[in-house]
Structures are given as C-alpha cells and as structure tokens.
Image (cartoon, rainbow, N blue to C red):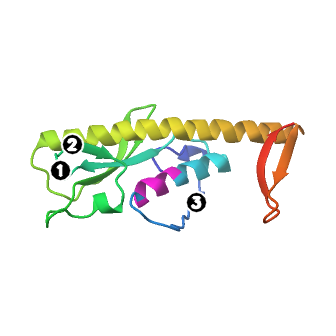
Amino acid sequence: MEAAVLLHLFPKSKIEITLWVLADDGGRLPAAINAATLALVDAGIPLKDLVCACSAGLSAANNDAIVDLNRREESSFGGQPAVYLPCAMLPQRGTVVLSQCEARLGSLKQLEQVLDAAMDGCRAVAQHLQAAVREHSASLLTARSGQARIQYSFENQLPVKISHA
C-alpha cells in the first residue's frame, strides 16, 4: 500500500489497516490487497492509483496460465508444488508492486507467461474496483443531496440499499 498512498500528506502519522479473513478458498492475499485498497478509498486517503491484485499460475493439465486460483489450484499437483504467483500492481501506471512466487519454474518464458496473466487479471480487477468506487460515490452523493431512499430488509431491519428518489 505504501506505493500508492501519498504519504507526504501524512507526516508523523500512522495509517493502519486491519483485515479479517472470514473464509478462504484461495486468493487470500489478492483479496486482502483489494479490500485494503477499497478501505483506503472509502476512508478518503489520497492515492496515486488503486492497488489491484490477482493471482495466476499454471494449470497442471496443459501448462496454460490460469488466473484467480482457488485453494485446489494453489495446492500441489502430483507431488510437485503448484505455480502460484500473487501479483499487485498500480494499473494506471503499469507498475508491479508485488510479485511473489515460491515454486520453481522451468524457464523464464513460464515466469513471463504467469506474470503477464496475473497483470491482465489485475487490470480486470481494476475495472471492477473503479466501477465499485464510482457506484459507491454516486450513492454517497445522492444521500448527501437528500434525494436518497433507504430500503430496509424485513428480516433484520438493516438498511440494504440506498437508491435515487
């Protein structure tokens, strides 16, 4: 997150992000990075760019690159450790800020293949995060202008959705 936060605006300050993982079917690190990015945006912390994360690896069947691995795909295949590469990047700048692979790769070409797939995944995640930020911002703007209508769920009486009046 340090790569994205405009730290010079917060001298002598500490920004702490705490995340709780409630379920884990793989992709824990990329999901945590994406959640932390959205938490910073929601808190109004100025960022250079969104930090978007995705994982990639190689399929056991045909050595093709796969994106957003689940727990089974992250685990080893036939005694060989699976190729699992979580990656985080600043998509508008095209800068990789995290790339972590603990498996042995047969060649530099395999690394490039997996890293390219992870970066493509990050760019796709960036589009979804940007859309979520826009939607959330629009609902906040609507609520602040006094034109929002809050719909309640009858089951637990909690606000479910804010919509335009």
> In the rendered structure, which amino acid carries the disc numbered 3?
Lys
Q: Residue at x 80, y 61 (%)?
A: 158
Is 29 positioned to the left or the right of 6 in the image? Answer: left
| Chain part drawn in magenta | 28-34
Tell which residue pokes out farthest to the right in this image: 146
Please, what is the three-letter code of the amino acid marked with disc 2? Answer: Asp
Disc 1 from disc 2: Cα separation: 8 Å
Task: Name the side, left or right, on which 71 lies relative to 10.
Answer: left
Instruction: Identify the residue under disc 3.
Output: 14
Q: Earlier in the sequence, mark 2 or mark 3?
A: 3
* Spot occupied by residue 19 in the image (x, y as percentages of width and height): 54, 64
Question: Which label lies toward us, 1 or 2?
Answer: 1
Residue name at image x 83 percent, y 50 percent: 151
Please identify the dominant SS of the magenta region. helix
Tell me which corner region of the image, top left, top right, bottom left or bottom right, holds residue 110.
top left
Residue 54: x percent and y percent? 39, 47
Picture layout, residue 98 above or below residue 78 = above
